[in-house]
Amino acid sequence: MSPPKRPHTSITANTNPNANPNTTTNTGSSGGSISSFTMKKAKNGVQVPRFGGAGDGEDGGDDDAMEEDLEKANNASADAVSGVAANLSRKKATPPHPTKKLVIKLAKGQAKLPPNFEEDTWATVKSAINAIFLKQPNPSDEEKLYQAVSNLCLYKMAGTLYQRIEQECEAHISSTLQSLVGQSPDLVVFLSLVEKCWQDLCAQMLMIRGIALYLDRTYVKQTPNVLSLWDMGLQLFRKHLSLCPEVEHKTVTGLLRLIDRERYGEAIDRTLLNHLLKMFTALGIYADSFERPFLECTSEFYAAEGAKFMQQSDVPDYLKHVELRLHEEHERCFIYLDASTRKPLVATAEKQLLERHIPAILDKGFSMLMDGDRVEDLQRMYTLFLRVNALESLRHGLSLYIRGTGQGIVMDEEKDKDMVSSLLDFKASLDRIWEESFAKNEAFSNTIKDAFEHLINLRQNRPAELIAKFVDEKLRAGNKGTSEEELEGTLDKVLVLFRFIQGKDVFEAFYKKDLAKRLLLGKSASIDAEKSMISKLKTECGSQFTNKLEGMFKDIELSKEINDSFKQSSQARTKLPSGIEMSVHVLTTGYWPTYPPMDIRLPHELIVYQDIFKEFYLSKYSGRRLMWQNSLGHCVLKAVFPKGKKELAVSLFQTVVLMLFNDIQKLSFQDIRDSSGIEDKELRRTLQSLACGKVRVLQKFPKGRDVEDDDYFVFNDDFSAPLTV
């Protein structure tokens, strides 16, 4: 229908020749109406004003008078256009004429609404709304419906219109939700019906909002506490969903059942879940109606599953399962759950699958993973424990493991020979796990250090002694097949163990004793490696710790100079017996270990050599005193056996015993003791090494491991060996 005709008002047209003939000008209006004119092109090429109000396209009341006045306006406009053309043809412009104004007076009339205007207009809108809800063709085009709503708003009928639209929507929504009561017992089918209902409502409310957009943009915005048509539709849906508790309960139950099925490995319609959960979010009932029961069901589900899997699975498989479950829940939040659920959902799963089972996981599988060097599984354990703030429990478990395992290494006296190498392997394994599994966590590093310090000092001085022996073994000349880089790396690792030792003076005593033997017997693998080790110890313990060790090296270097000088001396050239070479180490007593003096009857040749060297030394360094340390002496003897000649590298004591057999084939224990003057215990050890070891230069009768007083010894004519001994 057409709106009522508006009263005409006076319009002032600007006929300034400089004005744009295509300009559209708005004018004031009386009686609250909106009037405008648009310049319409007439036959003579001049724009003709076209008038309109709220209902464009309808003529005003006094059409004949308007046409007559418009004709005059057109003529005036034509003259103005001619004047503009004439002015443009002149070089100098003439002063413009005063602006002329055309006043058009229209007869005033009173605006009247047709009878039943509001009811008829609403009937049109209502018919369209019902068609939308019934999914029928719209009886009116959208432009006409939009204009109808606009007219009702312009004539102050917006409030009533809003209420009527709300009533229509509520009736439809109530009816639709009621129709779901008692529907299919199949939960998936039922959820599909609810989704269809929701999708339909959303589409219908958007269409209604499109028709009543003018109402949404004027009345709703200008009126406090009035919802937009979209929000009004949501509110009505929420209201009537709550009035149908069966529908809401069945929907929530169906959602929970579907998620349970998915957790058991079934394929489900995730899109259906996504749409329905977005419906709950849009309605503002997601947290109370769905999330709370969902988290409760999740907690129950994982509580049962965690207890079951902990009994049936080993720890590595259980941790993989937990990792997979947490990933699934995280993914679930991205696919169909609301983002706000992610944090409480993951926390619920973590609590039931991890927090409750931390002690059981550690008791059941931690030692097994550590023993097997299962770096990847330990990394997974660390990562999962970190999620539930259980690293302190893991760190405590690590400490107990190191102490328990290390105690088995340190306290087993039968394995003393391998203690240091076992500890080094154990420490290397722990360092690798710390780096690759425990993310180089400083607290875990400190735990390893504290546990190692505890276990290395369980046996007081024994570990210190064995560490010194281990270093001695690595630095001896016999340790071939090891590059300098590998040797340096081994020394660095040993130094780590050395740091844990509380009795470092014990280590120093044994290290000094072994170093003395290596230097005096020429058994050191590398002087550079020896000095490198001294430098490391100096860095660790200070110069006071290594002063004497450094002094030993100085004595060795000085002894070389003395020996060179001795060989060039007149005493050596004129008095030394031929066929014998001797090298003497002159040592400073304070630097070297204390050795008990041992008397021995040396062969005549050696006594002569000692006397000549003593004469040379005292002549060069007057006021000094030489004291021979027989226990440190060693010799290389040339021996002739029936099966060939051999060179025997032996101690001074062994040399004295063997040289007794130059003149006689068979000697008793008592004969050897009387002739050599070697102390009883040392003599037995010496004879045992010559007659009872792998290399038997002498033969003992009767045969046996121990040397007895009534034993006698014979030079072994059958001796043979593939190498120089």
Image (spheres, rainbow, N blue to C red):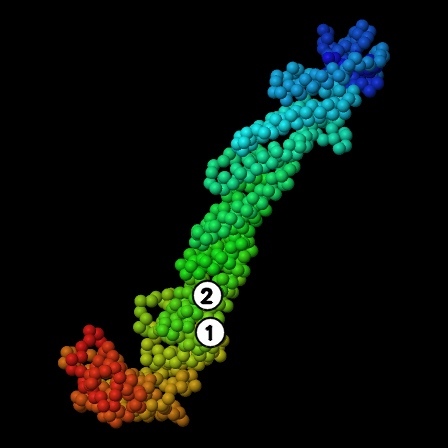
Q: Are marks 2 and 1 in contact (CB under 8 Å)?
A: no
Task: Return the x and y of residue 708 as percentages of the image width and height.
Answer: 25, 88
Quadrant where the image shows the N terminus: top right
Question: Residue at 43% of width from left, 86% of height from top?
Answer: 590
Question: Residue at 45% of width from left, 62% of height from top?
Answer: 431
Q: Does residue 463 appear left or right of residue 277 in this picture?
A: left
Question: Residue at 39% of width from left, 71% of height from top?
Answer: 419
Residue 548's place in the image compared with 411, above or below, is below
Q: Residue 646's quadrant in the figure? A: bottom left
Q: Does residue 89 appear left or right of residue 371 in this picture?
A: right
Dot 2, crowdedness within 10 Å: few (<14), some or many (≥20)? many
Q: Which mark is residue 402?
A: 2
Question: Residue at 77% of width from left, 22% of height from top?
Answer: 157
Q: Residue 251's quadrant in the figure? A: top right
Quote the CA–CA distance across marks 2 and 1: 14 Å
Q: Would residue 524 be visible to someone looking at this image?
A: yes
Q: Which mark is residue 281?
A: none
**Front position in the image: 479 or 22:** 479
Outermost residue, left side: 642
- Location of mark 1 (residue): 457
Q: Amino acid at mark 1?
A: Asn
Q: Amino acid at mark 2?
A: Ile
Task: Return the x and y of residue 576 as percentages of the image width and height.
Answer: 26, 89
**Front position in the image: 221 or 471:** 221
**Front position in the image: 84 or 371:** 371
Residue 182's place in the image compared with 695, above or below, is above
Quadrant where the image shows the C terminus: bottom left
Task: Return the x and y of residue 301 as percentages of the image width and height.
Answer: 53, 46
Q: Does residue 181 appear left or right of residue 406 in this picture?
A: right
